[in-house]
């Protein structure tokens, strides 16, 4: 037999793999404005632009049904896709869902999942336009495609940040990661002592952040109303560090990030101390917050300051200045992306 | 613990399950013209209409990598989605791909898969607009969403067939099913005697039908050029019987199908005899042919007759006349859909 070269997928990482597989991708249709490599693709359809994003979630890799109610899973599966549409400054309008389910799931279980899907559709005014349901020999696989619309050339990519632009983030960070740690701890206790009931205390904030995230359509609407056009944008699914690195790489700029400006919820801070971990590390590397990270021209500073849920956490610099974290202690470190790599992930279940 | 009712998914069947899960689906956006329940959804985008379809393929359920080269799998995964777009009389323009892959696959293996994807994109003039690649703990999962466009209100659904319309089909039927039987036979021989090389003889037609199907964009283009507007249309993925039943149910009509008019390739007929199965049964219940089944007004008969790859196989009747098969022997039977049920499917591997 012919000897074949074997390169492990994990050796390239998620983003390296996508770059590799799409290196020869050609676009043939004039309507394809933006293809692989951003939060979503942009297609021109007779003047109006359509934004498309897709995501796959696999049981045991992306979620653990031991502590994820199916209704929450349905809701979250939709939201993470809508978040990608938001990250293009577009408005989500439609989704399609494909499910692979093993016969361990009943119709009632799927009903619960769909309750969550419909709740998200209602909240975000999105239509479920189609789907496919099939057998899987093991577990639960969810693939969702979200479609949105945006006024011509008003979409925002990862690649428009300029030297001097302000770096902004919505909401608070690190909360989902801490919620996950809490659920994992209670799962371990339960597995060892099935009689013990989970003690989630009053950690509603963090449990909510991991089980029921929201897409920031509110911020997209606010920016559109105020006619503030960000220069670049991405949603935070893998952690602040990883997303900053994406913006810097795609925009060919450097960045200064101030540790003391990173918004962290009080309950997250308390929970981090309980777990003996640094809340800043949770924000930088935790992921799954689904907040928006974006840059604006300095001239927009006063208008941005008027939105209480947007925080200016740094500014963009020349590429040769690198990507720097200014710590509370006054030190300056190179920022390193340690975001979650789904291709090297250990199983969650 | 509260006792919960448990209904097995397989008890509803694929179509029953989709009906059940989407029974309360509401559409909120005025642009949603056609939602769940056809080959694809239709969304109005400022006058022009956009058609969307999605499909999930799971290793061991939908394909067996023992006899499916990854390049062919990539090609076929795209084609089956484009076929759904064709079944709306629309022109495919874009796809997105989500993959779940276990670490048993190397980067070189994914390259092969993508070679097939790109070959299909090139052949059908379609752009790969985005995707997601993630870990699966086992096997290979493919989810593709295809997007197409169609002139306003020129899309064709399953529900417009009228009493007296002619029932037409493209190409030949049953070939893919017979190709699959051949590959399964050679696999069994190989598993028992790994030294024996597969003997696919000169069965290139049938092996090609199962491993490298094509989407009938050529027929859609021809119908558009000739300005023939079918009254209903569906693609043949589960077998002729099953698809006829869909058209009849959705259009609320009956049907007369002539066995001697069903187009079957000579090589399929020979292979069926070799396997001691009835070629007509392969066409009726085999599936995976990805040909188009459609109805036209009788006034279009002469124009349809001008297309050598379209066959008139029957006509639509009143709903109370039922769905009937007129056999070569002169008998009349009720047509029964025995199409492949992916929710009750046995594992292929």
Image: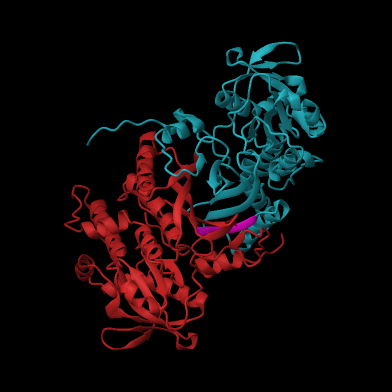
Chain colours: A cyan, B red
Quadrant of the image containing the N terminus of chain A:
top left
Q: Is residue B147 above or below residue A312?
A: below
Quadrant of the image containing the C terminus of chain A:
top right
Residue at x 46% of width, y 65% of height:
B344
Q: Answer whether residue A62 is magenta in the image.
A: no
Q: Is residue A26 above or below residue B29?
A: above
Of residue A149 and residue A342, the one placed in the foreground of this image is: A149
Q: Is residue B159 above or below residue B107?
A: below
Residue A60 left/right relative to A206: left
Q: Farthest residue in the top direction?
A: A331
Q: Answer whether residue A131 is magenta in the image.
A: yes
Residue B300 drawn at (x, y percent):
38, 75
Residue A265 drawn at (x, y percent):
79, 32
Residue at x 47% of width, y 48% of height:
B94
Of residue A252 and residue B335, the one placed in the foreground of this image is: A252
Q: Is residue B307 visible?
A: yes
Residue B239 left/right relative to A242: left
Q: Quadrant of residue A23?
A: top left
Magenta span: chief secondary structure: strand
Residue B303 drawn at (x, y percent):
33, 72
Residue at x 44% of width, y 56% of height:
B91
Q: Quadrant of residue A239?
A: top right
Q: Quadrant of residue B323?
A: bottom left
Of residue A94 and residue A8, the one placed in the foreground of this image is: A94
Q: Is residue A262 visible?
A: no
Total count of labels: 0
Residue A13 drawn at (x, y percent):
49, 30
Of residue A252 and residue B38, the one placed in the foreground of this image is: A252
Magenta stretch bounds: A127-136
């Amino acid at each position: 037999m012919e000897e074949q070269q074997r390169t492990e997928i994990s050796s390239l990482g998620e983003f390296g793999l996508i770059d590799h597989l799409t290196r020869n991708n050609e676009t043939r249709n004039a309507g394809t404005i933006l293809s692989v490599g951003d939060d979503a693709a942009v297609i021109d359809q007779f003047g109006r632009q359509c934004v498309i994003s897709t995501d796959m979630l696999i049981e045991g890799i992306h979620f653990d049904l031991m502590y994820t109610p199916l209704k929450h899973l349905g809701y979250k599966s939709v939201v993470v896709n809508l978040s990608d549409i938001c990250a293009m400054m577009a408005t989500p309008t439609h989704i399609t869902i494909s499910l692979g389910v093993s016969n361990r799931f009943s119709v009632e279980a799927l009903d619960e999942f769909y309750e969550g899907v419909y709740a998200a559709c209602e909240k975000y005014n999105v239509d479920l336009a189609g789907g496919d349901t099939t057998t899987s020999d093991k577990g639960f696989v969810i693939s969702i495609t979200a479609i949105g619309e945006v006024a011509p050339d008003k979409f925002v990519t990862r690649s428009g940040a300029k030297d001097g632009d302000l770096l902004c983030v919505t909401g608070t960070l690190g909360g989902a990661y801490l919620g996950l740690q809490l659920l994992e701890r209670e799962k371990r206790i339960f597995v060892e002592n099935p009689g013990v009931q989970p003690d989630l205390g009053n950690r509603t904030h963090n449990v909510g952040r991991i089980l029921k995230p929201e897409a920031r359509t509110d911020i997209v609407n606010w920016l559109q109303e105020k006619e503030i056009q960000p220069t670049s944008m991405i949603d935070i699914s893998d952690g602040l560090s990883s997303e900053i690195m994406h913006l810097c790489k795609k925009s060919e700029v450097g960045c200064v990030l101030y540790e003391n400006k990173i918004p962290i919820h009080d309950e997250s801070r308390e929970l981090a101390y309980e777990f003996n971990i640094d809340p800043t590390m949770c924000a930088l590397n935790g992921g799954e917050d689904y907040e928006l990270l974006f840059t604006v021209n300095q001239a927009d500073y006063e208008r941005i300051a008027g939105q209480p849920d947007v925080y200016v956490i740094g500014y963009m610099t020349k590429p040769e200045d690198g990507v720097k974290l200014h710590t509370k202690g006054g030190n300056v470190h190179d920022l390193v992306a340690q975001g979650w790599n789904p291709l090297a992930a250990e199983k969650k279940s």
